[in-house]
Every structure is written in C-alpha cells, then in structure tokens.
C-alpha cells in the first residue's frame, strides 16, 4: 500500500538516505528477484521472506540467500554489494502446488559448501526439511496435518542444536521437533507439563520417540513471531492478542510480559547483548522493552501503518569512549561477580562515589548507542537510535519530578546501570549475559540518576514526562525470575526425566499475583477513552471506570504514551511500492524486501564506490 501524504515528493521512492555514518545507497545491480524480474501480484499471498546462511566457502562467495515469492522458493549465491548472481540460474528453485511457503530458516551449525539444512514452513501447516545444494528433500513434518492444521507463522532452529527446531502456527501454538523423530500416523496425545498465565506447555505421550516433543500454547489468537535471545536461553513471543511474552526456554517459565498500545504484535527482536527487546505491530509503534526491568522504556513513532519487521543493527550498535572505572577493569567474570556481590545499596554507594568523582574530573563517560530499524506496510524504512538519554533518562527529567518511593537524588543505583551497559560488545552471545547481568540491572529501575555530564550523544528522541510507575517495578520479582531460569536446555528436553524436572519448578507467587492482576483486561483494548467505560465495567463491577482505566494503562505492562520517552526516527523513507516484509542487517549492507518480490541491497557508507551507482539519478534522502 502506498504511503499517504499527498505530494509527489512524499510518494517518491528513495534510493539513498543519510545518517551520521554517511550515505546508504541502493545497489540496483545487486537486486534479487524472480528470474523474469516482473513485479509479483501479491494479492492474497503470504509475505515474502528472506533467509541467509554462510557456508564458509573458500572462494569468498560464502553467503547463500533463500526467498519465497508466492508458490515459489528460490536459492541463490548471495554476493552482497557486488553484482547479483545470474537470476536465470538459481542454485535451486521449487514451485509448490496446493500450499505456499510462508517462512524458512537455515541451520548455521551444519552448513557447508556441499550441504545445507533448510526448514520451510507452509500455509497449510506442514514443515519441510530440504537441502537446496544437493536438491534433496529430507523429511516432511506434520505431513497429514495431525499436529496442527493452521498456517506456519515462524520457525527457527534452536540455537546450538543440529536437530531441534521450533515451529509457531497461527493457531497460537508452538511445537518443538527433532529431525531424527517421526511424526506418527495418529494425532498426538499430550500431557500437561507446565502451566502459567495464558500459556501452557505439554509433552507428547508416546511409548516411542515421536514429534512433537513439546507443545506450547501461548496467548489468544495467532502467535505471529518468536525470537531466541542471543545466548539461546530465552524466547520472546509476539502474539495477535497484543502481548509480548518472554520465557526461559529450557524451564518453560514466564519471565515477563508487555502489552501493545493497541492491536496485535507482529514482530519482535533482541538487542545483540540481550538486554532489550523491540516489538512492533498494529499500533504503528515500535516498543522498546527492558529484559532485566521487565518494563517498557521507550516507544518509537514514525510509521503510518502496521510495523511488519524490527531488527537490531549489530554493526552500528556500539560502546564509545569505553574508559571503565578502575574498580571494573577486570575480566568479564570478575565484572559479573562484582555486580552480584554489589546488588545492594552499600556496594552501589561506593561505586557511585567513585563514578561521581570520575565525572567531576570531566573525564568522558561511556557512550552507549543501540541502532535498530523497522519496516512496515506503509512501505517505509525507519532507523532508530537508542541512546543514553533514553536508557538513563532520569537526570534531565528529575527537575520536574519528586522522588517518593525511591532513593534520594544522590542514589547510586543508576551507576550500576551505566557500568553494566559497558559490556555490550564484549558479552554479545555470551552464555551469562542475561542471567548474570539481570540482578544488577534490576536494581536500576526507575531510580534517579547520578551526576552524569551535561553533554549527551545526539538522539532523535522526544522526551516525555518520566514514567511515575518506574520506581515501583518489582525488582525482587525480576531477580527471582532470572535465577530460576539458569538450568541448561537440551539435556532437559531430551532426557527421560523431563516431566519430573519441570514438575519441580513452580511459579513465584509475586509473578502469579502480578499476571492475575494484569490479564483481567481485554486483549488489544488499546487507547482507553470514556467510550470504553462499558468494557471496564464488565471487567469489574465494583470499580469505577476511572480506576479501571488507570489500572489498565498506567501499569508497567502498558504505560501511557506520556509516561515513556517517545523516539523520533533517525531516518524515515519510502523505499518501495508495496508493503515491506524484510529487514536484515549484514556487515557491508542492509537488505530489504517488499511484497512484489524484490530483494534490495543497500550498501553501508564507504562500502561501495560512487562509480558503481548512478548518483545523478538517485534522489537524495537526508535526515530531517
């Protein structure tokens, strides 16, 4: 759908745009599509999706790309910022009858130049395992549709596993498969393994090993997308009921939840260090959620329609001027150990005094920048910067606010916040990122800032009033939920005593009370006005509409718009004629795709010479 805005300039397709790093350029010679290059008539078709894998080819052409367009699936050598492969000669091409591919995922652990394992999900519910290099079809799962008859919405290989994969359906269920097991000739029978607020996990009852190993039932309505944390220990699920639910994957325990402003959530992704989750959906917003604090810390407003994909840019996410305080100059293990020992106020006080002393000498602090992007049905690409003034907003806002339930203005806990973010690049994909850092981060929720310098890095943010509920985040709940999810995974899933293992786990009372309180409200209710008083009265006849409205929107589950900072996009450009369905950040470029079936490569600044483009014909896209 075309973006609305009226003028010619508004609807003009951009082929380049500028950020502080430089100019990103669309490489027309690097475009991938169907061999005939004819725009695909996308009416009634499933979204175009793109998957990448590196096969470690010695020739330097190690990247492979797979994409689906309608009933067709293509597999090519991907050449990045160089000229695309010959589209008339795909490595593999498949045309399906009676069903359409909806999503796919490569297993990076088993990929070689001679063989790759590619999972493909379909609109009728089946899952196929193929090798597009050998042109083989290994297995077909849910072939008779006895496990689930609904469309496959998302599938992923379990991180670190060569045989386990997870599949989500529009029915709201997820299934854990093992490629070595069969699916059986009868419908599976399930036994309850774990249950919590609006989710349940069942194991398959069978005398012999068969698929699925587990069935997750999550929320109400379709489960649109899920994403594993960088260390593979946690699972974030975006559902049509508007809830983001984050689970400890191995323990099947709910870590935290978030509610969209209204409508369903369509996409979700993790920051490279696992500290933040970004979700987008039918409220046209991107929402940033803190994993350790279990709360919304910012929203981004820039899209004019549903947000279909969000993704972090691991290459631009960075820590600058990383001079650590002296007491945190040891190894990562020492760093985490100090944080664990110093979760209390006493340790924070000492580190605060040192950091204050350091700031008073005008030495430069650590500067944290997370870059993420989003694309939507409005055909626009937006880039966002998440910087210090959003992650630690309390200093500029403390003048207009009184701190009642929190520590005094000289409170040190924000120091822990600043220091713990130092390890963004060093702890990426480390096994202890989420579990070890959570205790220290949870203590920083809603606390006033330390004496940070006046100069903050440039951020396209529109700071609003600080969330008054920020100081009341249940830190003890956050810490306990992290510690209970420290068990290892595949051994639990594949061992014979899995049921007993799960049976010993119990939900914390605080979490149970919290979700009983939060889930009384209607799903996807969104913005509450006086017109919704009837719905509120149905929820609780003993309370007034005003009290119920305050309860619904004023919680950490779904704060009001004015309670959290509002991000403004660094870049917001119309780059396609049809709705955008893909956004992937690679080392030399970023990749987008639209529903017409065109996969576009955008070179990062300095990654391609001007002579290879036609700058005279490229309208300039600049930061507004």
Image: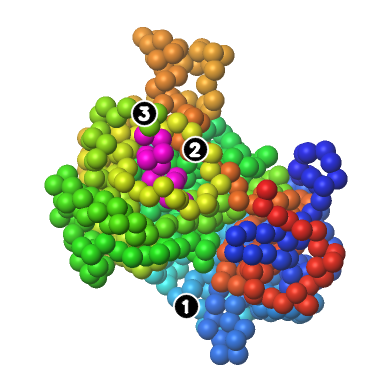
- Up the image or down, 491 lies above or below 374; here it is below
Q: Nearer the viewer, mark 1 or mark 2?
A: 2
Q: Is residue 141 visible?
A: no
Q: Main secondary structure of the magenta part?
A: helix
Query: Could you say where residue 200 lies in the image, as x and y percent from the top left?
Result: 36, 42
Query: Could you say where residue 424 lies in the image, as x and y percent from the top left?
Result: 38, 62
Position of 423 compared to 30: left or right?
A: left
Q: Nearer the viewer, mark 3 or mark 1?
A: 3
Please give the name of the residue rendered at 24% of the width and 40% of the height, measured from the top-left corner.
Answer: 410
* Quadrant position of residue 154: bottom right
- Asked if the residues shown at circle 1 and circle 2 are in contact, with their CB atoms under 8 angstroms apart, the answer is no
Please give the name of the residue rendered at 49% of the width and 37% of the height, measured from the top-left corner.
Answer: 463
Position of 118 compared to 290: left or right?
A: right
Q: Which residue is mark 3?
A: 401
Answer whether residue 583 is magenta in the image.
Answer: no
Query: Could you say where residue 277 lies in the image, as x and y percent from the top left?
Result: 45, 50
Residue stretch in magenta? 387-398
Name the residue furthest front: 361
Q: Which residue is mark 2?
A: 463
- Up the image or down, 403 lies above or below 581; here it is above
Q: Which residue is mark 1?
A: 110
Mark 2 element type: loop
Query: Could you say where residue 247 lies in the image, as x and y percent from the top left?
Result: 36, 49
């Amino acid at each position: 759908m075309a973006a609305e805005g009226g003028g010619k300039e508004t609807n003009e397709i951009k082929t380049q745009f500028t950020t502080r790093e430089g100019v990103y350029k669309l490489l027309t010679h690097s475009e991938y599509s169907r061999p005939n290059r004819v725009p695909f008539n996308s009416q009634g078709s499933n979204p175009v999706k793109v998957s990448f894998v590196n096969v470690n080819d010695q020739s330097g052409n190690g990247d492979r790309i797979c994409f689906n367009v309608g009933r067709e699936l293509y597999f090519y050598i991907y050449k990045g910022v160089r000229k695309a492969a010959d589209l008339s000669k795909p490595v593999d091409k498949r045309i399906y009858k009676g069903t359409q591919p909806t999503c796919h995922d490569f297993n990076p652990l088993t990929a070689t130049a001679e063989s790759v394992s590619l999972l493909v999900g379909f609109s009728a519910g089946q899952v196929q395992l193929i090798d597009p290099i050998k042109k083989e079809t290994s297995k077909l799962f849910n072939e008779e549709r006895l496990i689930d008859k609904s469309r496959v919405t998302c599938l992923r290989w379990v991180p670190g596993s060569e045989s386990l994969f997870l599949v989500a359906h529009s029915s709201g269920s997820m299934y854990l498969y093992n490629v070595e097991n069969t699916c059986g000739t009868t419908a599976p029978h399930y036994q309850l393994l774990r249950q919590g607020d609006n989710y349940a996990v069942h194991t398959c009852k069978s005398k012999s090993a068969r698929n699925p190993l587990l069935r997750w039932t999550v929320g109400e309505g379709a489960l649109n997308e899920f994403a594993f944390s960088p260390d593979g220990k946690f699972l974030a699920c975006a559902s049509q009921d508007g809830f983001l639910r984050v689970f400890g994957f191995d323990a099947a325990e709910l870590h935290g939840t978030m509610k969209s402003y209204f409508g369903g959530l369509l996409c979700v992704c993790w920051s490279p260090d696992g500290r933040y989750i970004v979700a987008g959906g039918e409220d046209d917003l991107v929402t940033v959620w803190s994993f350790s604090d279990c709360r919304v810390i910012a929203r981004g407003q820039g899209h004019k329609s549903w947000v279909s994909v969000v993704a972090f840019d691991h290459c631009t996410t960075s820590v600058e001027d990383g001079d650590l305080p002296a007491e945190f100059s040891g190894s990562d293990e020492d760093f985490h150990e100090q944080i664990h020992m110093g979760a209390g106020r006493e340790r924070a006080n000492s580190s605060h005094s040192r950091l204050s002393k350091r700031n008073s000498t005008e030495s430069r602090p650590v500067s944290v920048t997370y870059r993420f992007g989003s694309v939507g049905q409005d055909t626009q690409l937006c880039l966002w910067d998440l910087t210090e003034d959003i992650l630690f907003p309390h200093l500029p806002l403390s003048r207009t606010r009184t701190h009642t339930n929190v520590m005094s203005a000289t409170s040190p806990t924000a120091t822990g916040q600043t220091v713990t973010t130092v390890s963004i690049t060093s702890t990426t994909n480390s096994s202890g990122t989420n579990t070890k850092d959570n205790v220290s981060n949870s203590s920083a929720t809603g606390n006033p800032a330390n004496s940070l310098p006046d100069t903050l890095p440039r951020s396209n943010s529109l700071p609003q009033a600080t969330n008054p509920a920020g100081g009341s985040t249940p830190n003890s709940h956050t810490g306990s939920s992290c510690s209970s999810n420290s068990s290892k995974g595949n051994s639990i899933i594949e061992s014979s005593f899995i049921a007993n293992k799960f049976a010993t786990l119990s939900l914390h009372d605080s979490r149970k009370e919290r979700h009983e309180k939060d889930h009384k409200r209607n799903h996807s209710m969104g913005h509450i006005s006086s017109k919704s008083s009837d719905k509120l009265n149905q929820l609780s006849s003993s309370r007034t509409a005003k009290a119920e409205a305050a309860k619904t929107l004023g919680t950490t589950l779904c704060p009001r718009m004015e309670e959290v900072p509002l991000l403004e996009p660094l870049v917001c450009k119309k780059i396609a004629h049809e709705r955008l369905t893909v956004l992937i950040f690679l080392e030399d470029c970023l990749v987008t795709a639209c529903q017409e079936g065109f996969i576009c490569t955008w070179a990062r600044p300095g990654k391609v010479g001007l002579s290879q483009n036609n700058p005279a014909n490229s309208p300039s896209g600049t930061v507004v």
